[in-house]
Image: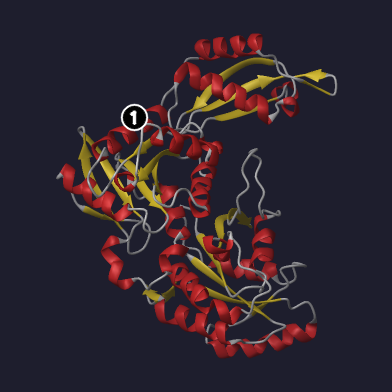
Amino acid sequence: MKPVVALVGRPNVGKSTLFNRLAGERLAIVDDIPGTTRDRIIAEAEWIGHVFDVVDTGGIDPTHGGKTPLSVDSANFIEEIRSQAMIAVQDADAILFLTDGTAGVTPPDREVAEILRRHQKKVNGQPWPPIFLVVNKCETAKLRSAAAEFYELGLGDPHPISALHGTGTGDLLDALVESFPPQAEEEEEGDDSVKVAIVGKPNAGKSSLLNRLVGRERAIVSPVPGTTRDAVDTRIEVEGLPVTLIDTAGIRRRGKIERGVEKYSVLRSFKAIERADVVLLMIDAETGITAQDTHIAGFILDAWKSCVVLVNKWDAILKDTYTMQEYTHTLRQQLNFMDYVPLLFISAKTGQRVEQVLPLALRVQEERLARITTSMLNKVLRDAQDTHPAPSHAGRQLKIYYGAQVRTDPPTFLLHVNDADLFHFSYQRYLENKFREAYGFLGTPIKLIARGRSEDDK
């Protein structure tokens, strides 16, 4: 897995600015999928050949629409900042602790520094995860010299930078990537189990579902240490197939987690999603879908993972003949960028429909590994173009000559066209829907890659 680097710090220290610089582009509320607007707080970054994921922990508080207001005094958010620091030190592979060089050392900075020092572990005699003290907004030589006052936080050498102008970020990234462990070969070689992650916002019922799934199957093989520190995977057998349940609920550590930390558990959810084959996204039927739910759904989509949406606590909803139909319509609207995922209304508390959860997840996994022949694929392409030719752009029209499936997991199709620039997103969605009509691909994203004629000649 790629290392995960968390940005931690109080409001208005420049976390989002540094995040965008590391990602190489502005990713604040951008998405190429029509009908969705969600804060992007995880992005892939690269430095001198090292690829890693960077997480802006300050962007997921659902009570503030996904953002912390910049105009408020950061002292009002000490508890929130503490919670971010706690979850980051538990689940990140490295931490960039941002401070403001123009403001000097503040009480929230001291609070976070104390948390980070107290909760670091020792791995091979070294503190883990490594913490880099970043003093931002040091645009002048005078401010860079003044960054020495941050030594009082006890986190080693300060790294004075300007995230806005890029000053000092190269030296910071050199030190960061040097701290990464060597990329090991996949440790799970020989582990052919289907990995199913249970994710969702706090109190959606993840713990209850996990306990009921494990108790119902009564076939625990062994607890397997996960790649997320302090988490434990559970091996069970379903319909004769080995399944690994990836627990993001933390039910074995409930007494060790401070109140409020779970709402910042984006790191844990993200790492579980990265490891999974199929993701079970749990929605609380009583509260409905929230901003944090759509955040997590976005991570699933960005990682190209298969998904089943579970609407939990269905037993607590007052129902009539049309309740499920109306709820389904609302969910489909709010998750319109994942309209291919199956919905299942369950109650982890009473066991209602829980027996359908894992068989449905296994069916989705089968669809993820499906492969269709080139002749059948091209028949669908011909019929689709005959029924609805691609619209013209600047007097030119997209022509698809032929296509082939180049991989599974997820299903990926290479289409040879006259000009890849003419392959508009709306026509991609049209073709994707045609593939689904013909072959299903339930709960699984489909990748369509267009290759122009000039590219084929290279």
What kind of element bears circle 1? helix
Q: Which residue is drawn at 49% across and 34% down?
A: 329
Q: State the quadrant of the C terminus.
A: top right
Q: Which colour scheme is used?
A: secondary structure
Q: In which quarter of the image is residue 192?
A: top left
Q: Is residue 262 left or right of residue 113?
A: left
Identity of the residue drawn at 71% across and 18% down: 390
**Numbered-mark total:** 1
Q: Position of residue 278 (x, y in %)?
A: 39, 40
Residue extending furthest left?
218
Crowding near pointer 1: few (<14 within 10 Å), some, many (20+)?
few
- Observer able to see residue 80: yes
What residue do we see at 20% from left, 33% from top? 240
Image spot of residue 85 (x, y percent): 49, 73
Q: Is residue 61 visible?
A: no
Residue 101 located left or right of residue 256: right
Q: In this view, does 44 lie above or below 260?
A: above
- Kind of residue indicated by mark 1: Arg
In this rendering, the answer to whether 10 lies above or below 225 is below
State the residue in front, 336 or 246: 336
Residue 308: image quadrant is top left
Q: In this figure, which residue is indicated by the disc labeled 1? A: 363
